[in-house]
Structures are given as structure tokens and as C-alpha cells.
Amino acid sequence: MSSALQIVWVYPDLLSTYGDRGNMLILAHRAKLRGIPVDTLEVRSDQALPYGDIYLIGGGEDGPQALAAQRLAADRGLHRAVDRRAVVFAVCAGYQLLGNSFYAKGAKCDGLGLLDLHSDRGPTRAVGELAGDIDPALGLPMLTGFENHGGRTHLGPGVKPLAKVRAGIGNDGEHEGAWSGTVIGTYSHGPALSRNPALADLLLRWATGEENLGAADDTWHTRLRSERLGAVGLV
Amino acid sequence: MTEKKLPLRASLAASVSRTAAALSRATGRGDGSVIGGRLGMMIDPDLLAHLAAGRRIALVSGTNGKTTTTRFTAAAVGVLGEVATNSFGANMPTGHTSALARAGATPYAVLEVDEHYLAQVLRATTPLVVALLNLSRDQLDRAKEVAMMAQLWRDALTDHPDVHVVANADDPMVVYAAAAHAAAGEGRVTWFSAGQRWREDAHVCPACGAHIERDETDEDAWRCANGDLARPVPQWTVDESGVIDPGGVRHEVKLQLPGKVNVGNAATALAVAHRFGVSPADAAPKLGEVASVAGRYAQVDRDGRNIRLLLAKNPASWLEAFDMAEEQPTLLSINARDPDGFDTSWLFDVDFAPLRGRQVLITGDRAYDLAVRLQVNDVAFTHVKTFAEAVAAVPPGRLEVIANYTAFQDIRAELDRVV
């Protein structure tokens, strides 16, 4: 086990449709800015999931989503990671498969049961800007992202919504994403951490136990955020 | 085919289509490549089929390179006689209708086809040859999934056993699309190899979901781990500046268009033209006459700067653009309007590291998305608000401009709609 922060990108061969590499690159970049050594590991779906501090799961098409869920269920590495309170950040298809069940290619599929939620098909495809007020318990500014999904996600009592929707649809038009412990799921692309650097820092704080990471120059992130939030009338 | 042989309604529709297109150009509202076809098809829904009848036609489709390959193919087939073509990139049925109506009676037509419309245009035009270039991610919020697109192509070909397919052996998605057609009869598919820089959409076999394995010793070889699909042996191949035909004869192509990717496009054009009976030796010199394609690769001199325009719409085409661009000051422009797709996440699928060390300027509606991407990529840059500001910010000499679709059109408009 290395002393560097281990960031594991789960199955980019299956789930990497929406610039998901960006979340890994941004986390690594922001860690290095603070002098935190980082290893990034891209783990294919025919490899065993290794030990990691942060696990990232991206978005993808129905077939690969179902396959990824099956392989993660068989691997159990992600379950062990959550048991030892590793950080998990999952987007779109990756978010859905952390729940108890989801729909892919018209069939109900078993999820990993790592978040208390289930997803089904919505009446419309949700495509467009997404924004919302993040759960105050997380102490973060407004969430901004781009969503593109046909599913609707229903939260159980074991999770809290990540945000209350101000623009777009998210889980169901009211809430967006979910979190529990150090596991977060969201429908936001952008990629999410590009538009929400404070969320990236939250993942790094959780993973390192470091309360104060030190400042980073967020000039461009900030301009991007105000432009996108402005586009939906929220600044 | 002559206009006289068109049914009356089709003849009227074709005439209205031409008039509308001419009006569109004359009033400066557009280049007339869509509006004419749209009106004509309202009068005669089968107008495209009527206009196609009697012509020998090639269709060119794929995510990238189709406009350039169409231009090359039209030049190559032009050795035989007059060719109708949709040279402005209007690649849906309305654009095909406009192009054929405008051209009048020609013995040949070469049509660029948006990949989503291939089945429909195959039905309407009964082509002699279809060229399938590549399939990769494009317009995340709207385009069909890559594997689904490959399946649609495959299904479309089953209804057209007589069409000859010229297909890219290097792209597993294209091979899947053409494989059933190839298996159904000897000599139905000609395979070419043009190299494939972008491979991120072909990790998984579209037939069975197993991994696509790459050979460590042979750069180009690939096969599905289950053995469902493997790279066919290509009959047409390329080297740095030449195309090798099925007989093993090398044809030097002295292209004005930059990049290895255009040597590949040239090979495709020669392979298609060969099916029309044009020898590659006769066709190759014609390709060197193409200087720009609907503004792409065009060079414009302004204020002592030689500005070259490169279009890059998606991750695969950005990689090709970096290969073409010289190590000179570079302007990147990104929009996310309707034709571009609204989701800019794909910027993180592109590695901008080749731009390190160059003077990089950024602009466009979505310059801030690009700014964050470049910062994370350790590429230094300056943000400029206008194209004029960018030109003023670089020293005399070459300015490479790489832009996505509507950003490219904006800059082209600044340069007086350069073609």
C-alpha cells in the first residue's frame, strides 16, 4: 500500500461516456496543488478492484451499465471499500447502479445496494442544465451540472438527497443525487467536479481526513460556475 | 437521367427547390443547401428517389471525415463525367435533394450522409457504393450511442444485398456494421485501413460485449476476446503520403490538405472510385487539387497573419487536428449550441498536452469550460473575447484555428464565408 492518495477510476472501458475522466483528473490536480501525492488507477472491468481511497464511477449506456453492475457485484471490492469508509463518487449510470435496482434495456437489474435507493424509467428523458441547493450538512455552494438520463431515482430512508433541485430534473424534479456516509451519487456531468470544485475538495477532505486543504486558484472554475448558473437564472 | 423523365410533380418540386435555393443564396440568408430540398420534398415526398433514379451514386457516412472524403470521392469519380454532390456538408435528405436538383442531370452523384440517416438514404437512392468511415462519440446529449449506431448500419445493409460497401477495417464498430454484409456474399465489402487514432469507443465488442484486444507487436491488429470479430485484412492501405491499392501498387497522393487522416480519406475515395471503374492512377492527381472543404483547412491572410481553419467536432477529430496543426500560435474556440450538442463534458476526453509550449488563445461561448480543462491539463492559455482580439494577440505568421462546429462557422463568417 502506497502512502500516496489512491484514486481508482472504476471500469472506464464500460462507464466513461460523459467526460468522466475529468473527475479523476480534477481530483488529482487539486490534490497535487495542495502537495498531496496521488496515484490514479484505471481499472478495467476484467480486473479486480484494488485498494483505494477514492473510487470514481462514471456514466454509460444501458448494456455496459448492466455489465458493470454484475461485475462489481461479483468482485465485492466496492462493498469492502464502502465498509471501510472509502470515498465513492458516482455519476449517472454509476449512481443508479449503487442503488438496490435500476432499469437497463427495459429490464430491471439488481444494483449493488450501497445506497438506499432504486431507479426506474421516467416519462421523459431529462436533458439539460441541472442545478440545486446542496444539503446544508455538506456545507457546499450550489450544485451545477448537465444531466442526460431517462431514469428517475427514488430515495429510501437510508440516504439523504444531495441537493434540492432549482433547475432541471435530477432524481425526480424535486431532489437530485443522494449521499450517505462518504458515498455520493449524482446525475451531474460537466464533468461534475469541473463545475463544483468545492465538491472535489469535500471528497479530498473525506479521503485524507485533512480539514483544511489550503486555498486553490479557482478563478476559471468560478467564472464557469457563474456562467452556467446564470444560464438558468440562478445568479 | 434528364429532367424530362421526372414525373410532373417531381419536376415541379425540383424546380421549386432550385428557385428557393437560388433565392436563399441571393438574399444572403444561407448557401441554399437545405431550404430548397425542404420545399421540394413538401411538394413531392419521393423527390429524392426521383432525382436519384438513373444516376450511379456513392454514399459516404461516418462520424468524422465524411465531408472531406465526399469531396475527394467526387473529384475522383469526376474523371468519368459530371458528378452531383452536397459539397456544403448539408448531409440529411433535404440537403441531398437540394444537391441533386441543383445539379440537374448528371450521370454520377457522391453524397455525404449523416450517420443517423443512412438507412433512409440507402432506400431512397439505391447507391452503387457506400463508404463507412468510422463511428465515435459525438454530441453527447443527442446522438445515438455508438454501438447502437453500428447496429442500425448493420440492419440497414441487410435490406440492400446489392450495394457494395467500402469499410474501415481499423474501426471495430464499422467492421461490426459491415460484417454481416461481408459474410453474406463474396466480394461485397472492400476493406481499407486508414489508421485510427481515437480508440476510446471501441474497448468492447459490439457483437458480444467482450473486450477488444489489441496486439502489442502489431499496432493495427485487434480482435474480440471471444473471437466474434477481428480486424479483416485490408485491401487498401496507406503510408505517410501514399495509398497502396489491392494490387500492391503505391500511388503518391500530393494533398494540399494536412494530416495523416486525409491520406486515409484519400484511400477511401480511391477505393470508392475504383468501384465506378476509375483507376487510382487516374484519380490520385485529382485529389491534390482540393485546397479546402467548406472552409475546412482554408488559409486566409489577414493583417500579416496566415490563418488556417481546422474543424474539430468531437474527441476523435481533436486528436486529428492536433496532428495536423503546426507548432504555431493556436486559437481554440468552443460553442455548445444546438448543432454542437449542449454537453461540453467531452472536453475532458481530449488530451490537450500536444499544445503545451505553444501560444494558446481560447474563445467561444463555452471558453470557460475549456479554460478549466486546459488548466487541469497544464496548458497555459489566454482568454480573448473576439476573433479580432485573437488575431491581434499573435505575431505575424501562422495562426492555427481549431474550432467546433458553430464556433467554426462564426469564424468563417468573420472571414467572409471562406470556402
Image (spheres, grey):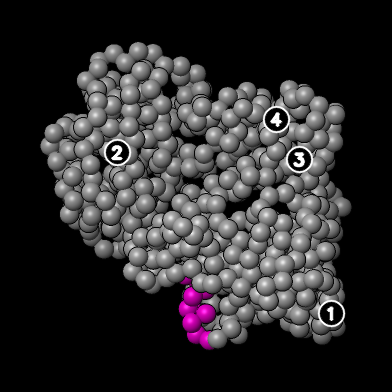
Mark nearer the viewer, 1 or 4: 4
Q: Which residue is drawn at 34% across and 43% down?
A: A42
Tell me, yes or no, if residue B123 can be seen here.
no
What chain does mark 4 sit on?
B
Q: How far apart are marks 3 and 4 (CA)?
A: 11 Å
x, y percentage for residue A226?
A: 49, 24
Vertical order, A138 against B21 (above or below): above
* Residue contact between numbered discs 3 and 2, judged by CB atoms under 8 Å: no
x, y percentage for residue B355?
A: 60, 33
- Amino acid carrying mark 4 in the image: Pro
Looking at the image, the residue that sits furthest to the front is: B217
- Amino acid carrying mark 3 in the image: Arg
Mark carried by residue A8: 2
* Residue contact between numbered discs 2 and 4, judged by CB atoms under 8 Å: no
Mark nearer the viewer, 3 or 1: 3
Residue named by callout 4: B329
- Amino acid carrying mark 2 in the image: Val
Residue named by callout 1: B3
Q: Distance between the residues labelled 2 and 4?
A: 36 Å
Label 4 residue SS: loop
| Residue B232 left/right relative to B394 | left
Q: Do labels 3 and 2 share a chain?
A: no
Vertical order, A132 against A171 (above or below): above
**Residue bounds of the magenta highlight:** B176-185
Residue named by callout 3: B308
Q: Principal SS element in the magenta part?
A: helix
| Residue B111 left/right relative to B20 | left
Q: Residue at x 14, y 41 (%)?
A: A80
